[in-house]
Image (cartoon, coloured by chain):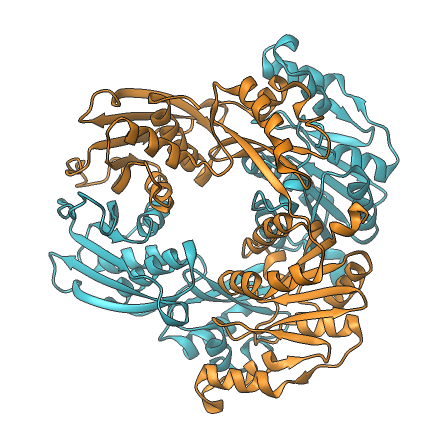
Chain colours: A cyan, B orange
Amino acid sequence: MPDHAATPRAQLFSVGSELLRGEVVDTNAAELAAGMARLGLELTGTRHLPDDRAVIARAFAAARSDAALVVATGGLGPTHDDLTREGLADALGEALAPDPSLTERLYERFGGPGRMPESNLRQALRIPSAEPLENPIGSAPGWWVDRDGCVSVLMPGVPSEMRRMWSEQVVPRLEARFALRPLHVRSVKLFGIGESAVAERVGDLLTAPGPSIEAGIYAKDDGVHLRFGTREDPARLDVPVERAIAALGEWAWGTDDDSLPGVALATLARAGVRTLATVESATDGALLAILAGHAPGEGEARFVGGRLVVPDAPGGAQPPRTPGADAILDVRLDEPGALGRSRVTVALAASDAAVGFELRQVRIHGSGPQRRRRAAYAALNEVRRTGTEL
Amino acid sequence: MPDHAATPRAQLFSVGSELLRGEVVDTNAAELAAGMARLGLELTGTRHLPDDRAVIARAFAAARSDAALVVATGGLGPTHDDLTREGLADALGEALAPDPSLTERLYERFGGPGRMPESNLRQALRIPSAEPLENPIGSAPGWWVDRDGCVSVLMPGVPSEMRRMWSEQVVPRLEARFALRPLHVRSVKLFGIGESAVAERVGDLLTAPGPSIEAGIYAKDDGVHLRFGTREDPARLDVPVERAIAALGEWAWGTDDDSLPGVALATLARAGVRTLATVESATDGALLAILAGHAPGEGEARFVGGRLVVPDAPGGAQPPRTPGADAILDVRLDEPGALGRSRVTVALAASDAAVGFELRQVRIHGSGPQRRRRAAYAALNEVRRTGTEL
């Protein structure tokens, strides 16, 4: 089978004029794009479309001529500007009609016809070739339309509803419908070095990472990630990963699913620290948000809580340090300086002096919330550096 | 002048295969879309494009035939897969050549030719019709290309660099180049009511908000927002705003630039509270992140710090309450229950009993980080409800 047949081309639409007015950030597109890449679909383009029936219809018609799969989120609500159903119906030349079983389900959801806003009846409309996709946590059912060799999928724009419909209803149908070859990915993660310097040091690893391997380099809040992917045997990714670590070991803090909080907490655990508390200033709580959001792993010190101190708050004398933790990580972020760089002052106080350090200062770049998250990651990287290297 | 001439059509590209693999979330598109709407540009579509020279070139060619402005971010880096310059050059049929003044500036930035990775030289390439846009905090200059009645703008994908180039270099040029009529927007913000119920209660306010007025309804973490916009006299927005408040006053917590933390802190200040501290559990610090990120306003109690308590942490007996604050807001989020709903328990302890309350329980829906932010907003809404209504 030719390679192309095994990697169906997909397009993705996020529908809603609010997206084109910048009133909401579209997180669905990135989430679905990642899911498609893992599955073995090639996403060739993503579009934000306005709540305009004709524009939506034209976009579906154009995408269906090029792609084996068109996925749209949003525009399935009950209000007058939810027009994704209508747009796809027009593109396919089919008429919308109420589906009695969908109407029944809506009535059930609302506890009876009298308790349902009449506008919700629009959510029970479908075209003959649409198979409804159940939405257990919302009122908008999705659609699966397999016609003329192209699959069109409609899902709600509410992220939690989209996520559940995608994993429970859409992914199994895609796996049954297409011959998919999932993408295998490996990454090397670095902190304290920029993209250009990485590209310079790894030679041709980015341009020629090996046969059937694609390489990429990404600047993230937790540093620069080098990523290698293949749809062939995943073992062939070991070579570029080893080459990258050999060239960049000084900055490398992990690979693949490693996270900087996990690596830092594991460093502490190896030094005998069981529990960590944090104090931070001028970071809006970025450090504790990262540590609280980290799923605790085996062989890691446990985060037991953190405190945000607002600098110069009236009556806000700095509260005493948290008792009951083996170690306390203290992070202070200065105002941004020249060239958009900020200074982060990090201290680690621990009963075991082997892992503590008085003060370290590192510089980070960026602005806004990103600047604060980078300060938190810089602190975690300092903790990691107190222990063993990768 | 016809209306259309005063609202130039724009298209927006975010370039980078990492976007199409879902490896990064595109926040630039929403930010630029909001900026364009305010300026008086009509954004008719946003696309994510892969790092593919031919695809980028075709996208520019197609967009330039329909739009007066095409803005692209990303793909201006130094690495082999940064191809936005090449794509636009191909679409315009112009050749790239090094610009000596751009090369000079790059050398300055890196501290000399010997200290600059050679790959960065690509960032000094331009086509004859491109006017360079200075990038004071990054190595990639932008481009402003005004040709054949259409303006094309290239900006870096790094959000901080994009943001500064947009406001300092691009916006002034757009204002000089186009006859723009800015969009005036007013909003009514609600908590504790869903979109369908809002639509039901406001009658035809959403479908017929008034002449030359557009209406929209958005579910946000801080509740449902009703938004009205016009490019005519902004005073005509007062009528739909007043109608919305009359119909929904019970749930309305603010209008326009009001923020829920600001409204809650103002409620506390009116009750004599000068300083607020917080304790929260199972929220990953969402409450303190919101309060720390809030710019302190006149007539508001001041947030002086917060603490995250990890439930059931080993050795993590709950630390004593923060001293030195007039009031302490305590928020506990339970695990999600049936139908994706979570219970939030809120207590407000204050020296002035007039504003305190023992325990209130509210339910929120959503999952993941959104669920935690909604819990924080639900708590702030409870604080607001202790004081005066809108």
Toward the viewer: B387 or A58? B387
In this view, B37 is above or below A355: above
B6 lies left or right of A379 = right
In this view, A385 is above or below B198: below
Q: Residue furthest bottom?
A: B114
Instruction: Specify whether residue B141 is in view.
Output: yes
Instruction: Specify whether residue A231 is in view.
Output: no
**Residue A101 in which image quadrant:** top right
Which quadrant is the C terminus of chain A positioned in? bottom left
**Residue B328 in which image quadrant:** top left
Q: Residue at x 66, y 10 (%)?
A: A113
x%, y% of residue B312?
24, 35
B209 lies left or right of A223 = right
x%, y% of residue A242?
45, 74
In this view, A184 is above or below B327: below
B50 lies left or right of A315 = right
Q: Residue at x 14, y 44 (%)?
A: A324
Toward the viewer: A333 or B325? B325
Toward the viewer: B239 or B359? B239
In this view, A278 is above or below B240: below
x%, y% of residue B256?
51, 36
x%, y% of residue B362?
39, 22
A22 lies left or right of B325 = right
Which quadrant is the N terminus of chain A positioned in? bottom right
Q: Residue at x 43, y 37 (%)?
A: B259
